[in-house]
Image (spheres, rainbow, N blue to C red):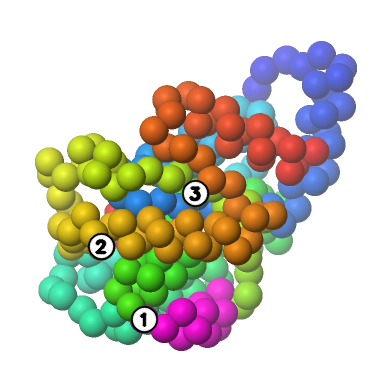
Amino acid sequence: MRERNPVDQYLYITILMNTKNTFIVLEGVEGSGKSTQSQVLSQKLSSEGISNLLVREPGSTNTGEKIRALILEGCELNPLTELFLFSAARSELIQNEIIPALDSNTVVVCDRYIYSSFAYQGYAKGLNLDTVAKVNSIATSHISPDLVFLLDINPEVSFKRTKANPRDRFEKESISFHNSVRKGYLCLAESSQNTWHIIDAEKPSEIISEIIWQKVITLLT
Ligand code: TYD
């Protein structure tokens, strides 16, 4: 941990006193860079001595990782089955990792959350948004994040980063599918402007990290 001058030290103690229940989510289409940014944020928090937990969806629990393999590597599933499977993995994550972390003043950084289900299974695959909301309110015990960062990018651009080597069923979907995902995210961000921050994901990675860091620090102080 680095040495701090008295002003920084005061700020640091204020941050430690305010970290309770801080839950941060990063969302975006494939290749938007949110997994990298989640890792950078977690590392920055750690380097400031702020206890944090980095998790990804689907996964980050034993059962969640098995469900992840089933969804991503398995055969085509209908959207409702997908919704239940993603929500089951999410329920494991919420009960076993996220709630205990928040209860012990640990900042949670989550790479994808319920908004992925709205964007992918709802907006892009056509499931009723009320259905997505109902299933997720049960799966998450209504736990919502304090901040959501949307790394917004045109899929045509982001796919230059991933499409050369698609790793799973979702990455093989068409550009128009991913355009619907992007539009879905933008609608979600529009309706919750207090919590959501849209970031242009074509900006250089260090600039994006700094934008995220400034918002997080503002929330924590
Ligand atoms: P992943 O390899 O983690 O993608 P990324 O690195 O872009 O996060 O695969 C997760 C895939 O699952 C991704 O294509 C989005 C999709 N997904 C849904 O369709 N619904 C969901 O609720 C979640 C969490 C993910």
- Residues at circles 1 and 2 in contact by the CB criterion of under 8 Å: no
Relative placement, left or right, of 15 versus 41 is right
Residue type for callout 3: Leu
User: Label 1 neighbourhood size at 10 Å, few (<14), some (14-19), many (20+)?
Assistant: some
Question: Between residues 83 and 197, which one lies in front from this camera angle?
Answer: 197
Residue 110 image position (x, y, % from top left): 51, 53
Residue 136 shows in the view: yes
Disc 1, SS: loop
Stretch in magenta: 127-140
Measured from the top left, where is residue 185 in percent x and y? Answer: 45, 59
Determine whether label 3 and label 2 are within 8 Å by CB: no
203, 95: nearer the viewer = 203
Residue 186 placement, left or right of 126: right
The answer to whether any part of residue 116 appears in the image is: no
> In the image, which disc is placed on residue 150?
3
* Residue sitting at x 15%, y 75%: 76
**In what element is the residue under mark 3?**
strand
Q: Earlier in the sequence, mark 3 or mark 1?
A: 1
C-alpha span from label 3 to label 2: 18 Å
> Can you identify the residue that label 1 sits on?
127
Label located before the other in sequence (3 or 2): 3
- Sequence-wise, the earlier of marks 1 and 2 is 1
Q: Is residue 201 shown above or below 9?
A: below
Instruction: Residue at 39%, 33% (x, y): give it.
Output: 202
Quadrant in which residue 5 is drawn: top right
Q: What residue is pinned by disc 2?
A: 177
